[in-house]
Image (spheres, rainbow, N blue to C red):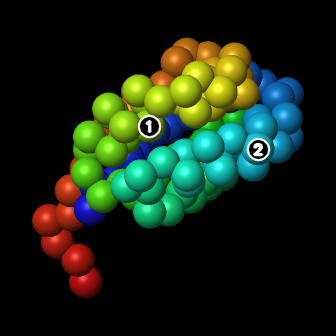
Amino acid sequence: MVLEHALLPVRPGREAEFEAALVRARPLSAASPGFRSLRLSRCLERPTTYLLLVEWDTVEDHTEGFRGSPAYGRWRALLHDFYDPFPVVEHFVEVLTD
């Protein structure tokens, strides 16, 4: 399992609109092969910052499968205008669990 991690800096005043857009965008990634789950959290100290965590079977399921699909174009159209600056997306594998 691979965990996609992105801190999403949303333009101030557009938080509710962003959250609604992510609800509409979620089925696009969820339908992609290798998708496991998606979680969005909002930062308490910086309320315009969100943490997106997406679980994939493999990193390629995200980087090649989803990002290479027509669904990603629709995801991008729904969400990318909210970010300032554009977020860094990284992938993690578990090394320790409790």
The one of 34 and 92 positioned closer to us in this rendering:
34
Say which residue appears at 41% left-offset and 27% top-offset: 68
Horizontal placement of 93 versus 77: left or right?
Answer: left
* Vertical placement of residue 84 versus 69, above or below: above
Q: Position of residue 96 (x, y in %)?
A: 17, 72
Marks 2/1 in contact by CB < 8 Å: the verdict is no
Task: Determine crowd level at label 1: few under 14, some 14-19, many 20+ residues with C-alpha closer than 10 A.
Answer: many
Query: What is the secondary structure assignment of the residue under circle 1?
Result: helix
* Vertical placement of residue 28 versus 82, above or below: below
**Residue 11 can be seen, yes or no:** yes
Q: CA distance from mark 2 to mark 1?
A: 16 Å
Horizontal placement of 92 versus 30: left or right?
Answer: left
Q: Quadrant of residue 8?
A: top right
Name the amino acid, label 2.
Arg
Q: Position of residue 66 (x, y in %)?
A: 44, 37
**Residue 42 can be seen, yes or no:** no
Horizontal placement of 81 versus 17: left or right?
Answer: left
Residue position marked by numbered label 2 in the rendering = 24
Name the amino acid, label 1.
Phe
Residue position marked by numbered label 1 in the rendering = 66
Q: Quadrant of residue 59?
A: top left
Q: Earlier in the sequence, mark 2 or mark 1?
A: 2
Q: Quadrant of residue 34?
A: bottom left
